[in-house]
Image (tube, helix red, strand yellow):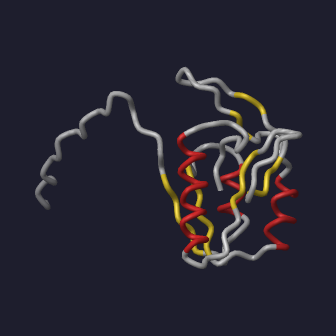
């Protein structure tokens, strides 16, 4: 599951499609899910509509913000998955729905976002002594 429109070029989309291709070559049954603009077609994916562009950080971010949760509920009810791999789980809304609507599946999350330039972690502090 990716939150970004599968009809657009992008790093997360490439990662998702290449990962699916590799898993399929290994014999796994893989379904790629994500937003897909009306009229767009991408081989090997199941797309959901309601796509809108939310520009942020100098990029176009086409997300399925207007996809009904009931659409995904019906999809997941008809396709019980063993594993649901969600890319960018903090990006609304499809990824949220996928996690909530598949409680019996094992969940894997991949986070692609990072600050640019990367910020160093704050220094660790020793815990206060026990009173």
Residue for point 87% across, 57% down: 71
Residue for point 70% across, 44% down: 6
Instruction: Tell me which corner region of the image, top left, top right, bottom left or bottom right, holds residue 121.
Output: top left
Residue at the outermost front position? 25
Residue for point 47% across, 45% down: 112
Q: Is residue 27 above or below residue 8?
A: below
Q: Is residue 44 above or below residue 5?
A: below
Nearer-the-camera pick, 85 or 8: 8
24 relative to 131 in the view: left or right: right
68 relative to 65 in the view: left or right: right
Q: Return the x and y of residue 8 as percentages of the image width and height.
A: 68, 36
Q: Return the x and y of residue 5 as percentages of the image width and height.
A: 71, 41
Residue for point 75% across, 55% down: 43
Instruction: Tell me which corner region of the image, top left, top right, bottom left or bottom right, holds residue 60.
Output: top right
Q: Return the x and y of residue 17 as percentages of the image width and height.
A: 61, 54
> How many numbered callouts?
0
37 relative to 33 in the view: left or right: right
129 relative to 31 in the view: left or right: left
Q: Quadrant of the C terminus?
A: bottom left
Q: Quadrant of the N terminus?
A: bottom right
Q: Is residue 109 above or below residue 53?
A: below
Nearer-the-camera pick, 33 or 90: 33
Q: Return the x and y of residue 47 as percentages of the image width and height.
A: 79, 51
Nearer-the-camera pick, 129 or 35: 35
């Amino acid at each position: 599951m990716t939150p970004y429109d599968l009809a657009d070029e992008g790093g997360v989309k490439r990662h998702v499609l290449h990962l699916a291709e590799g898993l399929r070559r290994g014999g796994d049954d893989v379904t790629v899910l994500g937003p897909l603009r009306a009229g767009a077609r991408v081989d090997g994916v199941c797309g959901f509509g309601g796509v809108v562009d939310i520009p942020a950080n100098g990029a176009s971010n086409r997300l399925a913000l207007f996809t009904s949760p009931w659409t995904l509920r019906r999809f997941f009810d008809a396709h019980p998955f063993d594993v649901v791999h969600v890319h960018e789980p903090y990006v609304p809304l499809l990824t949220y729905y996928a996690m909530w609507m598949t409680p019996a599946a094992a969940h894997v999350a991949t986070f692609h976002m990072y600050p640019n330039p990367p910020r160093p972690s704050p220094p660790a502090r020793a815990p206060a002594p026990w009173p």
